[in-house]
Amino acid sequence: MTTPYTTESDARIDRFARRVQNSDKEAFNMLFNMLWEPMYTYAASMLPDRSVAEDLVQEVWIDYWQRREEVQIRHIKPYLYRAIRYRCYNALRDSKFTPLQAETAHTITTPAETELEEDVTELSKKIQTIIADLPERCREIFTLSRIHHYSNTEIAGQLQISRRSVENQLSLALTKLRRELYVVRIFFF
């Protein structure tokens, strides 16, 4: 099994983030000291004005501290980099910039692998929540079918119900998943 962290440093950063969620100011200061300079460099690489880059990084940190208790973040580093990137894009959008600057902004991204991992994690959480909200019998049938790979006939035999009942319950579960994940499909495709 692979580790979700690219380095031990990333694991350490996430441990600090969990402490920040509990209003630990020392942990926040440690995170700030570790990540402020690389975040500033990242923002400055996208923006022509270094003072604007500095202001945007400060805004991201202020926002993070203010929302620390409500925000559920598994890996803080990609979250912060994504936040600074969006702020930079907004600053560029709101200012006059050359086509070269706009092209440069679109080419600078956080590592795709890190973002993909975050997106997959969020999608997985959403699916688990939807499955957990299914009625008990529907959830049981869906789990046997899609997670344990039982056939509809095997499920019907095990639960002593008709195969048609199994099919109906699976149809209900899949309809709910499709409906709830509609926004995700638009985002990914």
Image (cartoon, helix red, strand yellow):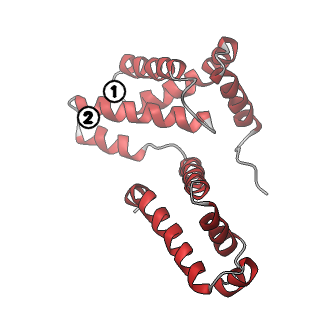
Report the side of 33 relative to 2 (left or right).
left
Q: Residues within 10 Å of mark 2 (few under 14, many from 20)?
A: few
| First in sequence: mark 2 vs mark 1 | 1
Quadrant of the snapshot with the N terminus: bottom right
* Amino acid at pointer 1: Pro
Residue 163's place in the image compared with 175, above or below, is below
Q: Residue at x 54, y 36 (%)?
A: 79
Tell me the number on the disc at residue 93: 2
Residue 31's place in the image compared with 5, above or below, is above
Report the side of 11 relative to 184 (left or right).
right
In this rendered view, identify the residue nearer to me: 154 or 165.
Answer: 165
Q: Residue at x 31, y 32 (%)?
A: 90
Where is residue 167 shown, x and y percent of the image? 55, 80
Where is residue 133 shown, x and y percent of the image? 57, 54
Where is residue 169 shown, x and y percent of the image? 55, 73
Which of discs 2 and 1 lies nearer the camera? The answer is 2
Q: Residue at x 69, y 72 (%)?
A: 144
Where is residue 189 shown, x and y percent of the image? 39, 63
- Judged from the image, the secondary structure of the residue bearing numbered disc 2 is helix
In this rendered view, identify the residue nearer to me: 97 or 7.
Answer: 7
Identify the residue at the far right of this view: 1
Q: Would you name the residue on which mark 1 appears?
A: 48
Distance from the alpha carbon under mark 2 to that under mark 1 = 13 Å
